[in-house]
Image (tube, rainbow, N blue to C red):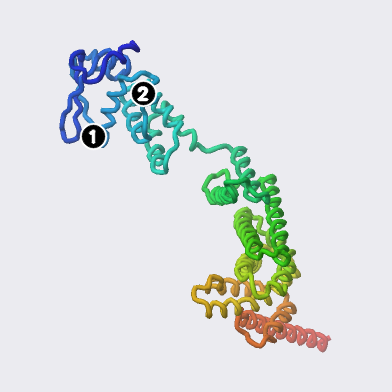
């Protein structure tokens, strides 16, 4: 029977014994001259039709305009050998269209070939969307096509996440020609997984091994940042050193976002506060006091994330640590912003100005953080703020008003308490 598909050809009128009429939705007919031996061998649907006395040697098929070409492709492929069939596919769209008809007409060989092709070739986004829409309707015979998009189990998801974290936080430079592209890709994939609706992800980020690897990754990035930052005051090639520090700050920004989604932001905050004095000391070095404004701006942007997390209660740390955070960074922010504004006013298009949103966010976080400190600590910080010649930024007047109100209320409560004690003593 296999030889028949080689000897005969579609539309070979001299040897044809069956006519197939394709009619599109406009009723336009087109005749295809086929062979009963081929149709019976390759399709159960046609085999059943050919034994129907009402059909005879003429088979009428109605099809829509959009799948007319797929019908023609199916008829042509009935004449191909199994090996030639697999080699004949040239697009996902064509194979998927023919597959739907092959399932409908019960063409086992063509169905298997379509499935094998679609399982193996890459899909574009639109093609994948179409496959996800069509294949589930075709039943078990085609479901293996969806193997690449099936949800994986917890263990597999966890292993992928850990591997991505390790690669994304690696401090070893990738081999050429990839540069940092693979590392950046791994970082993007981690963020994508954390933003996914997969029900496995909350279980993954709650896993102790995953948390441990994430903390190790944070330490790796901090270690790299510390090393690069130290080079700023030692490196003769300022541009090269600045580039490495900027990349390290970008990595810190990335891990900060990741840890915040994993409920591990406290790890970042603790490391940030521990390292703050060293950062300020290097930024205030005489060699850097009039340069590295891009680096200083990135540090301020990262510092806002820490201030925000602590100020609004997302990360809980002792009062002494909160005081340390404010007293270290408030002077640096107050000193740096006017310089950035001044340069920005002189140079059109200056890229390192603190925009309004960042300024407002920092100011709001500091006010929230300051207002939650013990009153004596608030008083010390506010006194330093008011001792400055120019009270421009950040504006802590709201925090000052809150402190004044609370102080008066506390004094009133104290006086009222003393009066009650005095009256009780007299009555005795």
Rate crowding at label 1 as few (under 14), some (14 to 19) or many (20 or more) other CA atoms within 10 Å.
some
Q: Are marks 1 and 2 in contact (CB under 8 Å)?
A: no
Q: Residue 132: x percent and y percent?
A: 41, 38
User: In percent of the image, x 63 and y 43: which residue is there?
Assistant: 163
Q: Give the residue at x 78% y 87%.
A: 423
Which of label 1 and label 2 is nearer to you? 2
Specify the label residue 110 is tagged with: 2
Q: Residues within 10 Å of mark 2 (few under 14, many from 20)?
A: many
- Helix, strand or loop at disc 1? loop
Answer with left or right where residue 198 lies relative to residue 219. Answer: left
Q: Is the residue 312 above or below the residue 108 in the image?
A: below
Secondary structure type for disc 2: helix
- The N terminus is located in which quarter? top left
Using residue 376 as the reference point, say whether residue 296 is left or right of it: left
Give the quadrant of residue 119. top left
Number of marks in the rendered image: 2
Q: Position of residue 153 (x, y in %)?
A: 58, 37
State which quadrant residue 70 falls in: top left
What label sits on residue 346 in the rendered view? none
Q: Is residue 312 visible?
A: no
Can you say whether 382 is above or below 112 in the image?
below
Q: Check disc 1 and report the residue beneath it.
A: 64
């Amino acid at each position: 029977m296999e030889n028949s598909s080689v000897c005969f050809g579609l539309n070979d009128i001299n040897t044809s014994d069956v006519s197939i009429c394709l009619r599109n939705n406009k009723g336009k007919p087109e005749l295809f001259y086929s062979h009963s031996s081929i149709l019976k061998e390759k399709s159960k649907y046609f085999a059943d039709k050919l034994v129907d006395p009402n059909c005879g040697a003429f088979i009428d098929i109605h099809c829509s305009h959009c799948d007319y070409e797929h019908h023609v492709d199916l008829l042509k492929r009935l004449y191909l050998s199994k090996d030639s069939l697999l080699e004949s596919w040239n697009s996902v769209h064509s194979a998927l269209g023919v597959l739907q008809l092959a399932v409908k007409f019960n063409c086992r060989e063509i169905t298997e070939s379509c499935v094998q092709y679609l399982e193996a070739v890459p899909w574009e986004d639109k093609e994948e969307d179409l496959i996800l829409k069509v294949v589930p309707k075709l039943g078990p015979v085609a479901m293996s096509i969806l193997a690449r998009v099936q949800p994986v189990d917890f263990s597999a998801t966890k292993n992928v996440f850990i591997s991505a974290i390790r690669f994304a936080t690696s401090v070893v430079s990738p081999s050429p020609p990839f540069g940092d592209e693979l590392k950046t890709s791994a970082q993007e994939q981690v963020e994508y997984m954390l933003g996914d609706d997969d029900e496995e992800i909350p279980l993954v980020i709650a896993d102790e091994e995953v948390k441990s690897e994430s903390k190790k990754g944070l330490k790796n990035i901090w270690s790299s940042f510390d090393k690069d930052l130290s080079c700023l005051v030692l490196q003769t090639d300022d541009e090269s050193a600045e580039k490495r520090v900027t990349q390290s700050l970008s990595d810190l920004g990335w891990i900060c976002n990741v840890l915040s989604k994993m409920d591990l932001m406290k790890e970042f905050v603790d490391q940030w506060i521990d390292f703050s004095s060293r950062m300020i000391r290097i930024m205030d070095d005489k060699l850097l006091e009039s340069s590295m404004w891009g680096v200083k701006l990135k540090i301020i942007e990262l510092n806002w994330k820490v201030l925000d997390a602590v100020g609004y209660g997302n990360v809980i740390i002792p009062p002494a640590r909160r005081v340390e955070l404010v007293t270290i960074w408030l002077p640096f922010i107050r000193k740096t912003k006017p310089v950035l504004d001044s340069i920005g006013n002189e140079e059109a298009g200056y890229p390192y100005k603190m925009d309004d949103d960042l300024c407002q966010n920092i100011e709001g976080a500091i006010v929230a953080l300051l207002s939650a400190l013990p009153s004596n600590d608030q008083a010390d910080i506010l006194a330093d703020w008011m001792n400055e010649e120019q009270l421009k930024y950040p504006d802590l007047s709201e925090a000052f008003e809150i402190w004044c109100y609370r102080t008066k209320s506390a004094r009133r409560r104290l006086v009222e308490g003393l009066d009650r004690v005095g009256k009780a003593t007299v009555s005795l």
